[in-house]
Amino acid sequence: LFSRPVTFLRGAVKLDDLPPTDLPEVAFAGRSNVGKSSLINALARQKQLARASGEPGRTRELNFFDLDGKIRLVDLPGYGFAKAPKKEAERWTRLTQNFLKGRPNLKRVYLLIDSRHGFKANDDAVMKEFDVAAVSYQIVLTKTDKLKPAEIEKCLAGVAAKISRRPAAFPDIIATSSAKGDGIAELRGAIAVLTPE
Ligand code: GTP
Ligand code: MG
């Protein structure tokens, strides 16, 4: 699947901008700066497909990427970022929530967690919402290149214990580094399974 090019389809700032629901979609959610856009670039083997930045709050729209007309990757704005104008942040937070809870073709949400920090309070709140709304999600640890192998194992164990009782959480956790490429092939494989054929 990922041997084909990934292309930018459109950015959405309101419900009317969302593409039709004719293709399966997977979305990348998580706190600001956790590495959502970088992960999409790593999956796509393109450096500047999704705009990544050291400055939190970079992604301010729902960005849709097409993978060979088979599935779409959706780069979401991050949460937990207070520096953007309040009105704008509220608007994209509302759109993101509506999208995540009401999108019939959304196959899975990848919920990104910085492996250095683990779950924060707003991650717990988001997971609770997903559990209540029965939105299937899978945890992806990011930036594992910043940790030693033993620290990655510790983070994996801690995260696994925390999601074990969460009804909508997929039990497998994928540890990734967009910088070094670790776990990227595994994530590509997981996404390919969600695509028909
Ligand atoms: P928002 O759009 O603001 O919500 O952020 P985001 O989650 O899309 O994060 P983004 O991909 O823009 O990355 C944020 C910062 O983390 C950038 O400086 C990236 O270079 C850095 N980063 C992302 N992935 C990795 C990684 O695997 N390893 C390391 N070391 N840095 C990373
Ligand atoms: Mg981003």
Image: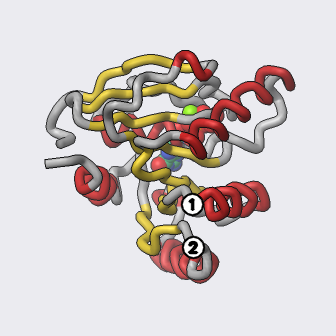
Left or right of 11, for residue 118: right
Residue 178, horizontal then vertical, whole percent: 41, 47
Which quarter of the figure has residue 189? bottom left
Q: Circle 2 is placed at which residue position?
A: 167
Label 2 is placed on what type of residue? Pro
Can residue 154 be seen by looking at this rendering? no
Q: Circle 1 is placed at which residue position?
A: 134
Measured in 3D between alpha carbons, the distance from the residue under mark 2 to the one under mark 1, in whole angstroms, is 8 Å
| Residue 153 drawn above or below residue 54 | below
Of all residues, the one furthest to the right in this rendering is 86
At horizontal 49% and vertical 51% (from top left) the residue drawn is: 109
Q: Nearer the viewer, residue 70 or 37?
A: 70
Answer with mark 2 or mark 1, whichever residue precedes in sequence.
1
| Residue 168 drawn above or below residue 88 | below
Q: Nearer the viewer, residue 49 or 98?
A: 98
Q: Are marks 2 and 1 in contact (CB under 8 Å)?
A: yes
Residue 23, horizontal then vertical, whole percent: 32, 34
Q: What secondary structure is marked by label 2?
A: loop
Q: Residues within 10 Å of mark 1 (few under 14, many from 20)?
A: few
Q: Residues within 10 Å of mark 2 (few under 14, many from 20)?
A: some
